[in-house]
């Protein structure tokens, strides 16, 4: 699915974009931890949304939010705070399709679902932050600061947004073609 590939593309570009803004390695590690925690939270929310409104509506919502967040929030991000807001919103939408959370556990009950989901979110945020800081320090920061500039990020964001937008348009077309009202008229 496009959202999974687009998500991995954004997660690959996000630290480089933060480096070009002059963000410290520790803050970039926190950004990666936030991204991973929000994917788990998004997976939980998407699971409940799909149970209530259906798979097609869930996919439509995910792609629409991903399109809006990349096209508006990420494209206009000028500082670390804006990147943080984009990361949370984007990862709760597009990242919800690549969860590290056992969604079958959500069927036990609402109280257990919230507690289990909360612990999973905290666990993945802490683990990702702890792992990403040394990896970023050793492998990524020197390369990104030496070879990347702020000129490359806008075309990359535009391409990602266009990918999500095309998927959203396709899903809207599919949604209306499957509508019982439309079929009744044919």
Image (spheres, grey):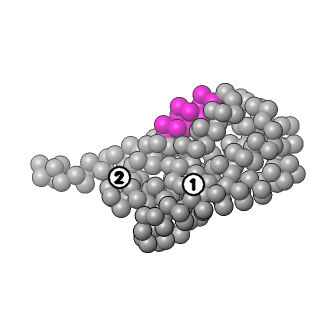
Vertical placement of residue 48 versus 160, above or below: below
Task: Say if residue 139 shows up in the picture.
Answer: no
Q: Residues within 10 Å of mark 1 (few under 14, many from 20)?
A: many
The residue drawn where x is 53% and y is 63% is 115
| SS class, disc 1 | helix
Closest to the observer, 144 or 91: 91
- Residue at the left extreme, as displayed: 185
Q: Is residue 168 left or right of residue 80?
A: left
Q: Is residue 145 left or right of residue 30?
A: right
Residue 145, image x, y percentages: 83, 37
Q: Which residues are magenta?
A: 67-77
The residue drawn where x is 50% and y is 43% is 66
- Residue at the front extreme, as displayed: 111
Residue 112, image x, y percentages: 48, 67
Vertical placement of residue 56 versus 26, above or below: below
Closest to the observer, 95 or 182: 95
The residue drawn where x is 41% and y is 53% is 59
Q: Is residue 129 magenta?
A: no
Corner quadrant of residue 119: bottom right
| SS class, disc 2 | helix
Residue position marked by numbered label 2 in the rendering: 57
Residue position marked by numbered label 1 in the rendering: 39
Q: Earlier in the sequence, mark 2 or mark 1?
A: 1
Q: Is residue 132 left or right of residue 108?
A: right
Residue 129, image x, y percentages: 74, 53
The residue drawn where x is 53% and y is 34% is 71
C-alpha distance separating marks 2 and 1: 19 Å
Evaluate if marks 2 and 1 touch, with contact meaning CB atoms under 8 Å apart: no
């Amino acid at each position: 699915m496009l959202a999974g590939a687009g998500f991995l593309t954004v997660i690959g570009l996000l630290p480089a974009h933060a480096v070009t803004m002059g963000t410290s390695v520790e803050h970039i590690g926190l950004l990666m931890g936030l991204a991973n925690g929000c994917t788990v939270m998004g997976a939980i929310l998407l699971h409940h949304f799909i149970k209530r409104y259906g798979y097609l509506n869930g996919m439509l919502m995910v792609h629409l939010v991903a399109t809006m967040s990349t096209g508006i929030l990420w494209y206009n991000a000028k500082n670390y705070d804006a990147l943080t807001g984009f990361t949370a919103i984007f990862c709760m939408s597009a990242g919800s399709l690549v969860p590290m959370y056992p969604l079958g556990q959500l069927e036990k009950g609402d109280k257990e679902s919230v507690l289990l989901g909360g612990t999973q979110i905290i666990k993945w945020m802490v683990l990702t932050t702890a792992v990403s800081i040394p990896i970023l320090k050793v492998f990524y920061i020197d390369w990104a600061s030496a070879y990347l500039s702020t000129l490359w990020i806008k075309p990359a964001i535009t391409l990602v947004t266009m990918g999500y937008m095309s998927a959203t348009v396709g899903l809207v077309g599919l949604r209306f073609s499957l509508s019982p009202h439309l079929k009744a008229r044919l």
